Image (cartoon, rainbow, N blue to C red):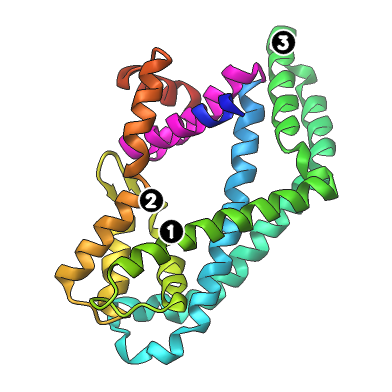
Amino acid sequence: MLNLLSATVIGFTAITLFGRPGEFVRPYLIALKERVPVPSQLAAWFLERMFDLLMALLVFGFALTQLPAKSEHVGSSLAWVLAVGGRVVGFTSLAVLVLIFGMRHFAEPLRKRLVALLRFVPERYRLKLEHLIGAFVQGVESTRSDGALLLVFIYSIIEWALIIACYWCLARSFQGIIPFTFIDVIVFLGFVSFGSTVQIPGIGGGIQVVAVLVLTELFGVRIELATTFALFSWILSFVVIVPVGLCWALKEGMDLRSLRRIGKEASV
């Protein structure tokens, strides 16, 4: 667990500092520490992202159901989002479920098919490619167990409950200034969760822009106050881990240059 914790903390620090390319630092470090193939951890990371996306879609779908009561605040900047939001949520959720269950039922047949197609490749390259394909299938092995699949889904629910609790605490600190209810927090998070997918290295990006837009357009908050709340949400979501991650990385003999190099190597 300590190896997984250190790799996770350092990995999320890399995401904040280097943007989305830093995503690959965490699976690379886990593979290195646990002595397992890197493709297996990239596959596990992909599976994790599928469940995260599914949970984000569920929260966003709930947010859309709560919008009629706030329709008087919706401006033109959000009107197009609301017009297609329900369809996007429905189709994307279906696509995610198809991917998850596709990995469950077709990962091994696909592996055998790909290995069969490699028979014309020279042996030294074929063996390496077969190893990479096998390692990737190993990484999604949990989808083939009903118990493991259910456990991953439960862990995802717990994770997102903690995220909602964090945003609720932030909203409480603005009590009397921004009249947020608990439902409002979930609506806010439903929109912001998709903004967080855009990470500009060092300064964030999407999460602040979407947060300000939702607060001003949907909740009628002044731009100055909305910007303050957006910055605090970004700090609590991403920046707060950086000092801990940097200290842990230095303790393990890594610096910013080596973290950046790891991210580039793992993404190739």
* Pointer 2 or 1: first along the chain: 1
**Do the residues bearing badges 2 and 1 touch, measured as CB atoms within 8 Å?**
yes
Q: Residue furthest left?
A: 224
Work out how far the residue at label 1 is from the one at label 3, CA to CA, in angstroms: 53 Å
Please name the residue that numbered disc 2 is placed on. Answer: 237
Task: Pinpoint residue 169: horizontal percent, then vertical percent.
Answer: 39, 63
- Determine which of the numbered discs, if any, sits on residue 166 in the image: 1
* Pointer 3 or 2: first along the chain: 3
Place residue 74 in its image quadrant: bottom left
* Pointer 1 or 3: first along the chain: 3
- Determine which of the numbered discs, if any, sits on residue 122 in the image: 3
Q: Is residue 69 left or right of residue 51?
A: left
Task: Pinpoint residue 259: horizontal percent, then vertical percent.
Answer: 38, 22
Please, is residue 90 above or below residue 30 in the view?
A: below
Residue depicted at x 14% and y 68%: 224
Residue depicted at x 62% and y 53%: 156
